[in-house]
Image (tube, rainbow, N blue to C red):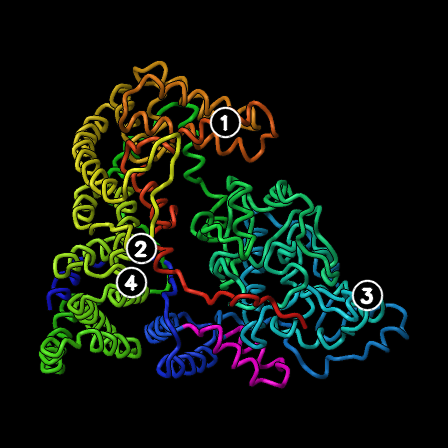
């Protein structure tokens, strides 16, 4: 098997579990039941090989929104405490809290009213004042607790959706009047049925019996900074956001995609409210929403995406990016990966960080030679936690032989009858339930990839490849690069328009990844494999006129990209030679400046490149780089830095240096437009941004951006997002959120 032989030697790396596109089948459903039983029986243990295989199978076939609706309609009884706990435990493998629900702990609200004051404890519950630690928590402890709370709340929200068929409304309402927060509604899914049963859902939050329960705030909602009855966890409830107008959101209504839309956010202390109070995040001024976020967690904000992924968003994210993430049907095209970081980034914040290293570099104007060396070599990034290790080569060799013995005749018939696609699907399904044979599953998936390539079905090839990358610790870039090249070698991608565009989309993303890893030889080969881009067949109209001239065709841009990458490969080889010299002479300003220009202008890695060029031989470039590293605090600063880069570009010929300086100017100009009022300065910035966007691309990255724009493709996607992307059902015409 050709793909098997190619792939078995090129699979290494580790990463985050991503959930590829697919629909739950009978096999997937059975796997889910088995996994649930295993988790309930083995809570507290780490994931076994079998569990990891089961998780991979689950990821391959998430429920469609229609299936979830049918499941929700079939359930007529409320979830019991035991079931709610099982859902949470099965989803996250977390142990039950000490506040497990028991019917003996339930007391009538009338008793609370008669007593005219809350009891010191209710069942196992204590007032929050009794749970406050004697000494304030340190920053690492506070951050760890906040991340734990984020995970628990996210799990509860997803369990609620799984049970009800929709997300909770932001508030319980009676006669159109909000009475209690969603935080009360998810109590059973946090394992707190006893507390939930004490509330009167028809009474306001600040009336008996509900007001007496405020001090019994669950640990998951407690602020680790204050330890009071107010919480910072809110749903985005502006009318433009997912939970606006007290909707009952469903997956199919989130047109921007549940993986790209925020459903939970930790706000600053000045917005904290009593946890039962039906108040959520509704910024009065959408242009100033950043002022409500980012003060608690070391330069960032804890959030969760609507697909259940916890996240950490840095304060450097722009207002526009925040707005795109909060809105649910704007069609902005922004992917989660544009701002997403794992919450682990927060937990590591108290350790020496790369950003702190950069601050030191700003002061000294130097970057360690070892850092340069690391960044000029192909470096596989970790993007998953729960994938299976690649089996040892001897085990794979044995499994390959067994596949030949077991399926040799089927493989021959599939080739003769042109049924490779069917057999590929069959192999993939078999692999996902082989929990006791990782080597066999790996070999079957490789065989499925090989069959998918032979079938010429690029959509199938993508699906099988993504499942393989989600199941095993293979290098995501490497398998995509090699797979694209092999698919192009065996097939004529030009024959099918849909396959043509899918190939181009993935190839461009892979090229961007390869440029980051300095695999210039590899990205050049991918570019050479790009098919002809026949826009007319897709109904494209290239009548766009920017700056008074017509855009170049996508076909010409592809050829330009191929030429630019060939030139970039030569420049990379020269840079690699300079790295060897820089190792020996880290004080050589000219060498540092040459490397800095390579990073800034060719790779677009300004964080690495700017500290290297500030002590270089070019006084103009050094002066602008120093000002850039000082940063900006307001629109005036943004404008000043942008103008400095623009003026530097005006004396340069067309090419990567002019393109790079314009790109950097454009970066600062776009920042200024977010905060700059209507003025002559704003008109000046808008004119320059228009000129920047209309110029012929002078670097590989600029050309890729232009091709993506012309073909209507996402400009900021990376391979992880491509693999993780799930297609959600959008509303039919006239369909809206359901109230009730």
> What's the distance in space between the residues labelled 2 and 3, CA to CA?
61 Å
In which quadrant of the rendered image does the C terminus lie?
A: bottom right
Q: Which residue is mark 4?
A: 469
Q: Secondary structure at mark 3?
A: helix
Contact between marks 4 and 3 (CB within 8 A): the answer is no
In which quadrant of the rendered image does the N terminus lie?
A: bottom left
Q: Secondary structure at mark 1?
A: helix
Q: Which residue is mark 3?
A: 211
- Part of the protein shown in magenta: 62-89
Of the two numbered discs 4 and 3 on the same chain, state the one appearing first in sequence.
3
Q: Which residue is mark 2?
A: 538
Judge depth for marks 4 and 1 and give the one in front. 1
In-image side of 215 versus 258 (left or right): right
Quarter-of-image position of residue 52:
bottom left
Q: In the rendering, at what x and y percent does residue 189 appear? A: 60, 73
- Pick the front one: 207 or 567: 567
Q: Secondary structure at mark 2?
A: helix
Of the two numbered discs 2 and 3 on the same chain, state the one appearing first in sequence.
3
Note whether 455 is above or below 686 in the view shown.
Answer: below
Of the two numbered discs 4 and 1 on the same chain, state the one appearing first in sequence.
4
Note whether 692 is above or below 269 in the view shown.
Answer: above
């Amino acid at each position: 098997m050709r793909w098997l032989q190619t792939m078995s030697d090129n699979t290494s790396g580790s990463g985050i579990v991503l959930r590829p596109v697919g629909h739950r089948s009978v096999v997937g459903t059975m796997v889910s039941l088995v996994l649930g039983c295993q988790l309930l029986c083995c809570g507290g243990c780490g994931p076994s090989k079998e569990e990891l295989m089961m998780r991979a199978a689950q990821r391959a076939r998430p429920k469609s929104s229609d299936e979830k609706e049918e499941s929700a309609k079939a359930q007529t009884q409320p979830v019991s405490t035991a079931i709610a706990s099982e859902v949470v435990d099965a989803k996250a493998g977390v142990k039950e809290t000490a506040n497990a629900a028991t019917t003996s702990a339930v007391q009538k609200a009338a008793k609370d009213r008669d007593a005219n004051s809350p009891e010191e404890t209710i069942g196992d519950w204590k007032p929050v004042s009794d749970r406050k630690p004697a000494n304030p928590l340190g920053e690492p402890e506070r951050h760890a607790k906040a991340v734990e709370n984020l995970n628990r709340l996210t799990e509860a929200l997803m369990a609620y959706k799984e049970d009800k068929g929709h997300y909770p409304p932001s508030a319980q309402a009676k006669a159109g009047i909000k009475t209690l927060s969603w935080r009360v509604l998810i109590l059973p899914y946090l394992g707190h049925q006893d507390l939930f049963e004490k509330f009167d859902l028809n009474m306001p939050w600040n009336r008996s019996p509900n007001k007496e329960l405020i001090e019994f705030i669950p640990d998951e909602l407690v602020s680790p900074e204050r330890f009071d009855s107010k919480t910072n966890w809110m749903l985005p409830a502006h009318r433009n956001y997912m939970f606006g107008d007290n909707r009952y959101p469903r997956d199919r209504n989130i047109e921007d995609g549940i993986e790209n839309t925020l459903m939970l956010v930790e706000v600053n202390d000045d917005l904290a409210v009593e946890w039962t109070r039906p108040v959520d995040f509704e910024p009065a001024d959408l242009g100033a929403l950043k002022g409500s976020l980012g003060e608690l967690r070391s330069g960032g904000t804890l959030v969760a995406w609507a697909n259940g992924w916890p996240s950490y968003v840095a304060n450097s994210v722009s207002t526009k990016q925040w707005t795109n993430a909060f809105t649910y049907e704007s069609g902005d095209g922004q992917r989660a990966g544009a701002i997403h970081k794992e919450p682990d980034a927060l937990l590591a914040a108290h350790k020496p960080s790369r950003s702190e290293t950069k601050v030191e570099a700003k002061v000294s104007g130097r970057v360690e030679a070892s850092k340069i060396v690391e960044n000029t070599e192909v470096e596989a990034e970790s993007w998953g936690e729960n994938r299976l290790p690649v089996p040892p080569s001897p085990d794979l060799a044995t499994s390959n032989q067994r596949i030949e013995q077991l399926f040799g005749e089927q493989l021959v018939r599939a080739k003769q009858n042109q049924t490779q696609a069917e057999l590929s699907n069959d192999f993939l399904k078999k692999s996902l339930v082989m929990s006791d044979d990782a080597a066999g599953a790996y070999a079957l998936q490789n065989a499925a990839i090989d069959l998918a390539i032979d079938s010429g079905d690029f959509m199938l090839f993508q699906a099988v490849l993504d499942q393989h990358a989600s199941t095993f610790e293979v290098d995501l870039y490497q398998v995509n690069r090699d797979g694209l090249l092999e698919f192009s070698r065996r097939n004529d991608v030009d024959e099918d328009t849909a396959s043509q565009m899918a190939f181009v989309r993935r190839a461009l993303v892979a090229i961007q990844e390869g440029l980051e890893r300095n695999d210039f030889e590899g990205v050049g080969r991918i570019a050479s494999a790009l098919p002809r881009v026949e826009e007319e067949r897709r109904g494209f109209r290239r009548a766009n006129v920017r700056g008074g001239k017509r855009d170049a065709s996508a076909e010409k841009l592809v050829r330009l990209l191929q030429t630019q990458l060939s030139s970039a490969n030569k420049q990379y080889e020269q840079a690699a030679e300079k790295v060897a010299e820089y190792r020996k002479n880290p004080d050589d300003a000219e060498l540092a400046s040459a490397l800095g220009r390579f990073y800034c202008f060719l790779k677009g890695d300004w964080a690495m490149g700017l500290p290297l060029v500030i002590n270089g031989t070019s006084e103009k470039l050094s002066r602008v780089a120093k000002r850039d590293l000082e940063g900006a605090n307001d629109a005036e600063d943004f404008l000043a830095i942008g103008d400095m880069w623009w003026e530097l570009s005006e004396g340069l010929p067309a090419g990567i240096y002019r393109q790079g300086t314009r790109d950097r100017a454009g970066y600062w100009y776009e920042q200024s437009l977010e905060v700059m009022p209507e003025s002559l300065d704003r008109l000046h910035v808008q004119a320059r941004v228009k000129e920047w966007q209309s110029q012929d691309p002078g670097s590989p990255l600029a050309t890729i951006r232009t091709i993506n724009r012309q073909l209507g493709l996402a400009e900021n996607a990376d391979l992880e997002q491509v693999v993780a992307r799930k297609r959600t059902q959008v509303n039919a015409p006239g369909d809206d959120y359901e109230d009730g």
